Image (cartoon, rainbow, N blue to C red):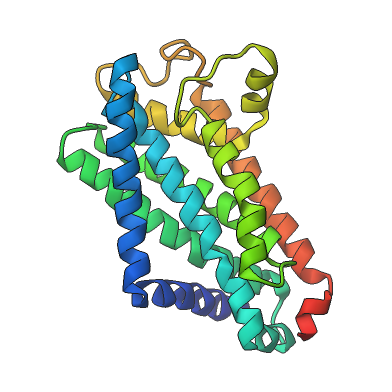
Amino acid sequence: MTSSLPVIFTLAERELVRFFRQRNRVIGALVQPILFWLLFSEGLKQQNLGYQHFFPGTLAMILLFTAIFATISIIEDRNEGFLQGVLVAPIPRFAMVLGKVLGGAAIALIQAILFLLLGWASSVVTPTPTDALLGTILMAVMAVALTSLGFAIAWRMDSSQGFHAIMSVFLLPMWLLSGAFFRQGADGLLGWVVAVNPLTYGVAGLRRYIEHANGMDRLATDAIPGVPPLWLCWSVSIAFAVVLLFACWRIAAARTAGDLK
């Protein structure tokens, strides 16, 4: 594993360098969530749900969209021939997977942290330093899980257009049915879908750390009706990341026609 560390760090660094060199991508990634947050929050004021309620959901949106779309580089690397060079190198497949996943997750986490600092500086949310740190660690776990999800799908895709079409099936439903937008009930089919959505628990954890740090008991299981307790949020989020990371390793270990493209 030690011998694979340079490979992991190099691939992760390559993802970061590629992202920051594309200025339009950086600007778009920062402006879009701010617009969503402001516009939807204004609309939600009619339901007594304002900026603070939508803030954790916006963080989840940043992590979800950025982490998954960062894995488009897998398709680009295959078409450019870079991925084939990595695959024939004498390195473990897991090192390649971990490098790509950590790079995409780092991009998503950096944007989420910047947005959190913006909300903190504008006093929209006022978490304690401890809550902010724990929330950041939870966002890192979510970023790894979501980037792994994008990796698993992108690995078998031949075109970025096909990747966009497939990911649209996951992105909006996964985000909307996570409690990021509206408070979700626990009854009926919709409640069941929300309960099995792993992103629900990441959003719930962020809500406890960030939104309800203002004068509420974030550790109480009944302080926020319908929101899972922190221990369950952490358990599901970590399991989600581990399972998907393992799945990426298994998928990348199997030979596909795209490896020789």
Residue 82 visible in rendering: no
> Does 237 appear above or below 51?
below
Task: Please give the count of numbered marks on the rendered protein.
Answer: 0
The residue that appears at 50% across and 63% down in the rendered structure is 104
Q: 7 or 212, which is in the foreground?
A: 212
The residue that appears at 57% across and 67% down in the rendered structure is 72
Q: Position of residue 8 (x, y in %)?
A: 56, 74
Q: Position of residue 98 (x, y in %)?
A: 60, 66
Decide if residue 257 is on the left or right side of residue 161. Answer: right
The residue that appears at 34% across and 33% down in the rendered structure is 40
Decide if residue 231 is on the left or right side of residue 96. Answer: left
Q: Position of residue 33 (x, y in %)?
A: 35, 47
Instruction: Pick the quarter of the image with the N terminus.
Output: bottom right
Residue 10 visible in rendering: yes
> Does 99 appear above or below 163?
below
Q: Quadrant of residue 106?
A: bottom left
